[in-house]
Structure formats: structure tokens, C-alpha cells
Image (cartoon, rainbow, N blue to C red):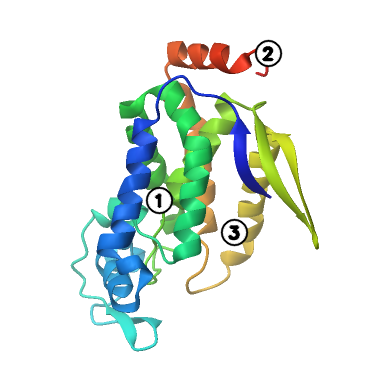
Amino acid sequence: MFPLRDENPIVRRPVATIAIIGLNIASWVFVQGLGNGEPLAWSLCNYGLIPGELFDRVPAGTVIPLGENLGCELTGDTSVLTLVTHMFLHGGWFHIIGNLWFLWVFGDNVEDSMGPIRFVIFYLACGLAAAGAQIFTDPAAAIPMVGASGAIGGVMGAYARLYPRARIVTLIFLGFYVTTVALPAIAMLGYWFFIQIAGGLPALQEAGGGVAFWAHVGGFLAGLILAGPMHRPDYLAQHLRHAAGPYDRY
């Protein structure tokens, strides 16, 4: 299932969501060279999160291959700032486009319930929780971890809690048949969360790179929990009145 849009209009312009999307695009263009070999590898080595290096679980001098004639030589002096910088890096075009699309679909409504400053704090907190969950499952990992997926998972968790009955127009693939259906947010996002757990369980037995399923799970749960104290009840009430229209959707 892939979300196309939601039927959940906003009251306030999502300035923080737009800014975060802009930062990710700027990083992709100016730091990662639009995904070209050397700039991409350089960004992953210097600004990606490498748990094994951060916690001294991998010896200095270890070379991590990233592609043909490309790799990271771990020096042992990585910065804790990579816990944040990794959230604004991506590994390829599909990675960044997919992440930012999900952020655009769900972020504006969550920001509408919090305001921009709270939303930024919430977003970063979810990203840190996601990183923590992934590190917990493999603290000696040497492959650079990058992507906004964990933080966006937090946004999706908050959306599921704040707007469980909002309709999500979703693209459904049934073999060669493709259709769209409007699903309650709790159904669409609950299915997404189940897929992350299903993917994460076998990943616990595997070494190497791949999808950081447990970062997604950790981010989602953090968002589900933090949505309570981080949202503003007056903002949420105003949003729900505006979104309801002739129906009480929530």
C-alpha cells in the first residue's frame, strides 16, 4: 500500500514540514551530489550514523565497502552529531522520494496539531528514538545508517494517534491489478507498522546493510507516545473542527 493523499485539511501552513523537506533536498543536492558515487560515499562516511564506530565496537582502520572502488575507512573519531545528521541523508533517489512523500502526506497534519517549533522538536526526538532502537538491535553495526525514515515513522505514529479515522487515499497493488481505496489512517498505518515488525524479526539474524526496520518501529512508537504531550489541545481541536466539515470524521 502506498499513500497518495489524505482527506484531512489543515488550518495552518506547514512551515516546519516544508523546511525539513527543503533541508533534505538541499543535503541531497549539495552534500550528496544527487547520489553520484564519490559525493554519496563521502557523505555516508562522514555524516552517516555508524553505531560500531560511535561506540568503539569496530576497530579503527576497518574499511567498509560501499560500492565499486568506494568505501569508508573508520578512524574512530566519529561525532555524536551523526545521530542527527544521518536523518538528512539518503542512499538513493527512491529512498529520498519515498521518505519525503510520506512526510508531505502526514507531516502537515501532525504539525497542525503542534505548531512548527514543537513539531521540529518532536521530529528530532522521534529520529533519535529511531536511531536508538536500531542501535539497540545491532550496536556493532559498521554500515552507515542514513535516512529520515525513523523520524517520519514517528510522524506516522503521531498521525495514527491524533487522526485515527482520517481517510487516506491509498494505492493498492493486487498482482497486475492496481486500484485506489480510501482507508482509515489507523488501518493503513497499522498495516505499515506490522510490515516493519515482520521485516525486522528476520533482520535480527542478518548482518550487513538493508532496511532499518527497527528504526521504523522505534520511531513509530516514539511518535505514538510523544503525540500526547507534544500536541496542543487547542490546535488539535481547531484542526478537527476545520477538518470535520459536514461530517464528524474523528
Q: Is residue 88 above or below residue 140?
A: above
Q: Which residue corresponds to mark 3? A: 200
Q: Give the structural element (helix, strand or loop) at label 1.
A: helix
Task: Please tell me which residue is depicted at 52% across the width and 45% down the height of the picture.
Answer: 102
Q: Can you give x and y, in whole percent of width and height, for residue 216 in the image?
A: 52, 50
Outermost residue on the left side: it is: 77
Which image quadrant: the C terminus? Answer: top right
Q: Is residue 68 above or below residue 219?
A: below
Q: Nearer the viewer, residue 171 or 231?
A: 171
**Mark 1: few/some/many CA within 10 Å (<14, 14-19, 20+):** some
- Side (left or right) of 175 relative to 116: right
Q: Three-letter amino acid code at disc 1?
A: Gly
Specify which label sits upstream in the sequence, 3 or 1: 1
Q: Nearer the viewer, residue 219 or 9?
A: 9
Regarding residue 216, the answer to whether it shows in the image is: yes
Distance, label 3 to label 1, CA atoms, is 15 Å
Q: Give the structural element (helix, strand or loop) at label 2.
A: loop
Q: Nearer the viewer, residue 229 or 184?
A: 184
Q: Three-letter amino acid code at disc 3?
A: Gly
Task: Specify the quadrant of the image occupied by residue 4.
Answer: top right
Q: Nearer the viewer, residue 176 or 152?
A: 176
Q: Three-letter amino acid code at disc 2?
A: Asp
Regarding residue 47, the answer to whether it shows in the image is: no
Distance, label 3 to label 2, CA atoms, is 37 Å
Query: Which numbered mark, 3 or 2, is in the foreground of this view?
Result: 2
Q: Which residue corresponds to mark 1? A: 132
- Side (left or right) of 246 relative to 78: right
The reply to whether discs 3 and 2 touch (Cβ–Cβ < 8 Å) is no
Q: Which residue corresponds to mark 2? A: 248
